[in-house]
Image: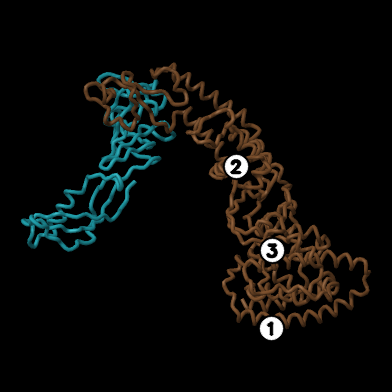
Chain colours: A cyan, B brown
Amino acid sequence: MFFHIVLERNMQLHPRHFGRNLRENLVSKLMKDVEGTCSGRHGFVVAITGIENIGKGLIRDGTGFVTFPVKYQCVVFRPFKGEILEAVVTMVNKMGFFAEAGPVQIFVSNHLIPDDMEFQSGDVPNYTTSDGSVKIQKDSEVRLKIIGTRVDATEIFCIGTIKDDFLGVINDPSAA
Amino acid sequence: MSIEPFNRLVKLAARAFYDDITTKGDNQPKTGRSDNRGIAVVVLDALTRRQWVREEDLAKNLKLHSKQLRRTLRFLEEEKLITRDHRRETAKGAKIFSAAVAATADGPHHSKEGDEKIKMHTHSYCSLDYAQVYDVVRYRMHRMKKKLKDELEDKNTVQEYICPNCSRRYTALDALRLISFEDEYFHCENCNGELVAESDKLAAVQGVDGDDNVRKRRHEKLKDMLQKMEAQLKPLVEQLSRVKDLPVPEFGTLLAWEARASAAARGINGDLNGNDPSKSSQGYGGTPMPFVGETKVEVAFSGAEGTGVDAKSESENTSLKVLPPWMIKKGMNLTKEQRGEVKDESKTDAGSASAQFSDDKKSLANDDDKTNIQDEYVKAYYAAILKKQQELEEAAKGQQELSSTEVTESVANTNSSRQVGMKAKREEDEDDDIEWEEAPIGGNANENYKVDLNVEASALVEEEEEEDDDVDWEEG
């Protein structure tokens, strides 16, 4: 699920960036630092949409670095248990398959794949129904439901299922 | 409107789910003697025969140690089957409860009149919460079924993997770490052995290789389990559906229940109130218990005071405390003063001046205003009303003189006793709270007189009541 929230961060800026472009430098550094990171609490920071305010800088002893408290608005992505996501399959093996929904990795184990789909090893490992009409392989797009999340401080990993109504392949690359 | 189906539900649920509950801690040795499995069933059964019950009494009746009982009760409370209430009270307070019990349940009636110590003890009470029991049982069954079905359909289960070499276990959540890029299998972090999927927990006894055969067997086992569960819980399910549309018996809070129980007791004393017109209009909000003639209470007041109290009690959902039996004996005669005072109190809602109010009422009425000013005011007011009432009585008497003396006599007895009871209670409470005011018991001049008013003049009185009500509102 996506959220638009306000976060705060203390930015350290090297003295060489001081000058009339200080603010721009600060913001670009913030984007570089923050976008794409993941915190267990808020999820993945997808994009910074605006700066709320930049506090007074504080020169640190010893170094010339200045610390600015910056409040910024950003879009975060946080997967939840029970959420339905669309994801791209990245790897298929005997144990199940891995998929990615943006920055999130999701594992679907083989007992959460419908029983009528069998694993086919070979050049392109895949899961196929007995009549061959549905095939899950690398780069397939699937709709899945998250049934568990593992949230670490800097990492979120999910396991999902496609063994439910309206879940499964939504776009088959080989058919296209 | 019977409580019986619900009791049956409780008993069935107790036997189905709480049969093997032991409240002993794990550290205690499980000798044959300390094995108290089934205690929950016994306690629940006992509670179906009671309503609110003091836990000490319950322990005594069940011949259990109170500690053991309390542990069981705490467990049942956590299971949301019963509600408990704790309060600090004097010996007298306990007595009030005893009286309430005597009025209703099969509990023993002990009224130790001797000890009037102001020692405060914390007493715990408990009772079944039927509405919640119903929900809890339904929820439990739902969860059981859902779990089995999920398991059956492999839904929402996190696959576990096990290392055949070092029998280390992993879940699917570890998958990312475990995947090896040489072959595409999961490898143990410890010994780099190839992990195998573990079949589900409910049927984990079979071998660890996750082939089709095992899966099929597991399926069968689960299906079997589900069927067995459905068969064995059938009586419970039936009872649930039977109970579904019945109104749930509610005891209310301890205070409310005490009030009602005492009211019932009074109702028994004075049956004639049953057909009083004012009764119908002034019911309590709560669901009536079979034994509680709740509405009878109101009628006990004569004339004007009746409505005042009733209105209040309605709004508060608690009216009066139990009448202690020893008070009844004391005096059948009431003075007008007393009556007047009562009336005043009920009107002013402060209960301050005359302080005849029961603890309940006081606590409910936010009785923070025990000021002398009010006292004075109430007295003046009361005097006025007294006067008025006298006039009324005169009128009533005139009418009533004609009616047969016998009836009047009986009426007088019952009514008066009831009134005395109420008053007595208030006096008692007063003792608790306000030492400075003497409960005026005295002039027994016009008992019959008053009673007449009560019974006969209820129609007349109603007009007056209305007036009084108006006044009341202004004050409020």
Name the front one of labels 3 and 2. Answer: 2
Name the side, left or right, on which B386 lies relative to B399.
left
Query: Is disc 3 in the same subunit as disc 1?
Result: yes
The amino acid at mark 1 is Ala
Q: Is residue B262 visible?
A: yes
Q: CA distance from mark 3 to mark 2?
A: 31 Å
Above or below: residue A14 compared with residue B153: below
Q: Residue A104: percent from the left, percent from the top?
A: 28, 39
Q: Residue B131: percent from the left, percent from the top?
A: 62, 47
The amino acid at mark 3 is Leu
In the image, which disc is placed on residue A117? none
Sequence-wise first label, 3 or 2? 2
Name the side, left or right, on which B331 lies relative to B25.
right
Query: Is disc 2 in the same subunit as disc 1?
Result: yes
Q: If the image is split into quadrants, where does the C terminus of chain B sit?
A: bottom right
Q: Quadrant of residue B388?
A: bottom right
Label 3: state its secondary structure: loop
Q: CA distance from mark 3 to mark 1?
A: 25 Å
Above or below: residue B226 compared with residue B252: above
Label 1: state its secondary structure: helix
Q: Residue at x 66, y 62 (%)?
A: B318
Residue named by callout 3 = B320
Q: CA distance from mark 2 to mark 1?
A: 53 Å
Which of B282 and B335 lies nearest the eye of the viewer? B335
Residue named by callout 2 = B69
Residue named by callout 1 = B380
